[in-house]
């Protein structure tokens, strides 16, 4: 019973540390990067023009979930294996194939969802409508922070489900 409490404490510490680190870094960098690149922050459009928002948000929509999922799955599996636990992977799946598949699915799903949302907003607005760049930068930073939190927790939960010793 004490070993289970020690492992639980390790998982809580690992989760808190990585959740805070990933969220803060993504919140700050993904707010600052678009804001610093807009020379005229009142002329930002979603897909058209010199200052389009899609060039920032669409790569982030794929890469952020992909990289965070890949990294957190790898780190979580290392902690689980260090604790002496065996991981049960789905049939015909190795460790890295499983990690890559889950990361690719998360990145692609997030990219498609954000792209569809942006297309719906673009179609519903007048053709010459421009956004405030500061507002879009804050929105992108907030979205990056939320995605970082979600995919960090999702990857850790996914590894915890793979452990033999823990019930689903």
Image (cartoon, rainbow, N blue to C red):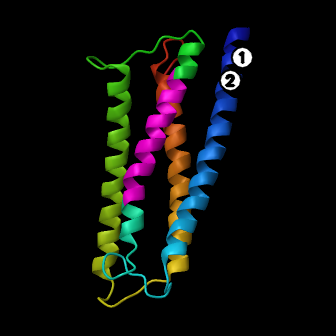
Mark 1 nearby-residue class (10 Å; few <14, some 14–19, many ≥20):
few
As drawn, the label of residue 137 is none
Residue occupying image coordinates x 50% and y 65%? 140
Residue 116 position in % (x across, y down): 30, 64
| Near-viewer residue (144 or 35) | 35
Q: Main secondary structure of the magenta part?
A: helix
One can see residue 85 in this view:
yes
Say if the magenta span includes residue 64. Answer: yes
Residue 10 position in % (x across, y down): 68, 23
| Near-viewer residue (82 or 8) | 82
Q: What element carries label 2?
A: helix
**Residue occupied by mark 2:** 10
Mark 2 nearby-residue class (10 Å; few <14, some 14–19, many ≥20):
some
Q: In this view, does 19 lie to the left or right of 60?
A: right
Q: What element carries label 1?
A: helix
Kindly report the distance in space between the C-alpha atoms of the residues bearing marks 2 and 1: 6 Å
As drawn, the label of residue 6 is 1
One can see residue 166 in this view:
no
Q: Do the residues labelled 2 and 1 touch (CB within 8 Å)?
A: yes
**The magenta stretch spans which residues?**
59-77
Q: In this view, does 60 lie to the left or right of 10?
A: left
Residue 41 position in % (x across, y down): 50, 84
Q: Is residue 140 above or below residue 13?
A: below
Say if the magenta span includes residue 122. Answer: no
């Amino acid at each position: 019973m004490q070993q289970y409490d020690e492992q639980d404490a390790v998982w809580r510490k690992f989760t808190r540390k990585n959740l805070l680190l990933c969220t803060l870094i993504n919140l700050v960098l993904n707010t600052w990067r678009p804001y610093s690149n807009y020379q005229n922050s009142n002329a930002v459009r979603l897909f058209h023009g010199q200052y389009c928002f899609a060039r920032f948000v669409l790569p982030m929509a794929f890469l952020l979930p992909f990289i965070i999922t890949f990294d957190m799955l790898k780190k979580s599996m290392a902690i689980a294996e260090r604790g002496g636990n065996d991981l049960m992977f789905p049939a015909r799946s190795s460790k890295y194939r499983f990690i890559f598949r889950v990361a690719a699915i998360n990145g692609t799903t997030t990219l498609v969802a954000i792209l569809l949302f942006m297309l719906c907003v673009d179609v519903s607005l007048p053709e010459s409508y421009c956004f405030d760049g500061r507002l879009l930068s804050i929105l992108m930073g907030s979205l990056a922070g939320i995605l970082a939190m979600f995919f960090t927790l999702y990857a850790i939960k996914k590894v915890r489900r793979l452990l033999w010793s823990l019930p689903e």
